[in-house]
Amino acid sequence: MKIIQIITKLEKGGAQLTVLEILRNKKDSVLITGRDGVLKPSALKEFKSRIYTAKSLRREINPVDDIAALWQIIKIIRILKKEGPCLVHTNSSKAGLLGRWACFLLSVPCVHTVHGWSFNPRQNPLFTLIAVFLERVAAVFTGRLIVVTTEDERKGLKNKIGNRKKYALARAVVDLKPFLNKKPPSNREKLFIPEGFAVVGTVSNFKKQKAPLDFIMTASIVVSKRPETIFLYAGGGPLMEEAERKAEKLGLKENIRFLGWRDDIPELLAAMDVFLLMSLWEGLPQTIIQAMASGKPVVATSVDGSKEIVKDGINGFLISPGKPAEAAEKVLFLLSSSDLRKKMGEEGVKTVEKGFSIQEMMDSLEKAWTDVRSPLKEIGFYYFKK
């Protein structure tokens, strides 16, 4: 059976990287995505004819574009359906809803991966009500709701999205070979890090979800107490300029490096002493998994998938979201003890070696793809046999 994956945009994010890993490991799979995204050119080069573009598919809500994107997705699936049996696997909120409605109209079986729900407590309550309602309706004719964390399943059931039988756990991961047992670079001159300085860093986009301004505030508190500390921020996004202005205003020009999008993430992680992630909400953050594979202790907010990976006091520390002072306290504590950093780093490696392999992800997905009914049969099963 051909697996047709759909994702809104090939930007640098955990969901997107996972989708590309599935393409690499499932040779009879294809991908439908929007026309934008920094990963799109390299993906087209690697997978060529296995990538289809729905030009109007984009993250922003726009009724005209969304209807056009739905029609484009329907046309592509209809063509692929003629080649033989297929199953659609949607990812992310926008592609998840449009893709599953396309499957309903075409009577094609579908599954959906929840990389963190589209609703969270920090959003407008009206938006949350609408998002939950749309997810509830789509879940009725969705064959499987695949979650990357048990927290996502708990949230889904709490909001009456699907029933317990529909849920399947498949932890989203990327290839960890470049990170495991990577030795730190012999010098940090390329990153302009003075000798003897500690390095705290993150790899994430500059969006509200990742709370980049909280990262800047944490850096300010740490530097005020330990000036010989450099902070690295690898990533890009809409809040980058604001973060740069805030860092300059706080006098952090010499202590923080805004690196933009990078392809040398293993080397960057190897150069860090502590990994810091200040997210307000999450799915399953690949950067934490990569940092742990690199043997780095993690300080992260206690949200969603982050709290399922970080064992507080064992492989890192969990802190409250929106609390830079709390984060700074844990970072300073880690920087004060190389033995503790080493011990937590070793525990982090053990954590990701146990349950975060691509083979385990693919095995879980193969099970989730099995025996999925068509949308109409799913509706009948839901209403008459639940």
Image (spheres, grey):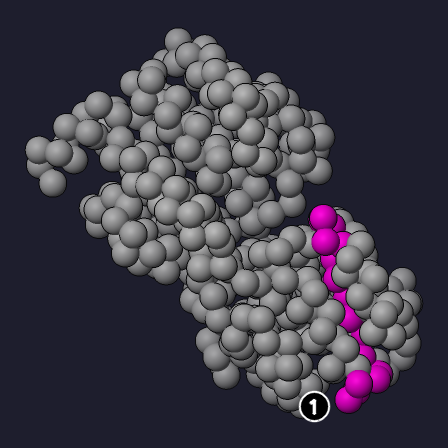
Q: Which residue is drawn at the image coordinates 63% and 62% (left, top)? A: 211
Identify whether 318 is placed above or below 202.
Answer: below
- Residue 96, horizontal then vertical, whole percent: 43, 35
Characterize the local packing of mark 1: few (<14), some (14-19) or many (20 or more) Cα atoms within 10 angstroms: few
Q: Which residue is drawn at the image coordinates 33% and 41% (left, top)? A: 133
Q: Secondary structure at mark 1?
A: loop
Give the residue at the far left of this rendering: 384
Q: Which residue is drawn at the image coordinates 73% and 82% (left, top)? A: 221
- Residue 265, horizontal then vertical, whole percent: 71, 56
Q: Quadrant of the C terminus?
A: top left
- Residue 344, horizontal then vertical, whole percent: 56, 80
Residue 222 can be seen in this image: yes
Identify whether 341 is placed above or below 165.
Answer: below
Please give left or right for residue 100 compared with residue 262 in the image: left
Please give left or right for residue 360 compared with residue 368 in the image: right
Amino acid of disc 1: Ser
Q: Quadrant of the N terminus?
A: top left
Q: Which residue is drawn at the image coordinates 80% and 54% (left, top)? A: 241
Give the residue at the far front of this rendering: 126
Q: Residue 327 lies in what quarter of the image?
A: bottom right
Residue 80 can be seen in this image: no
Q: Residue 42 lies in what quarter of the image?
A: top right
Q: How many marks?
A: 1
Q: Is 232 included in the stretch rendered in magenta?
A: yes
- Residue 127, horizontal then vertical, whole percent: 45, 46
Q: Which residue is mark 1?
A: 336
Q: Is 383 included in the stretch rendered in magenta?
A: no
Q: Residue 37 lies in what quarter of the image?
A: top right
Please give left or right for residue 96 compared with residue 265 in the image: left
Which region shows up in magenta?
A: 224-240
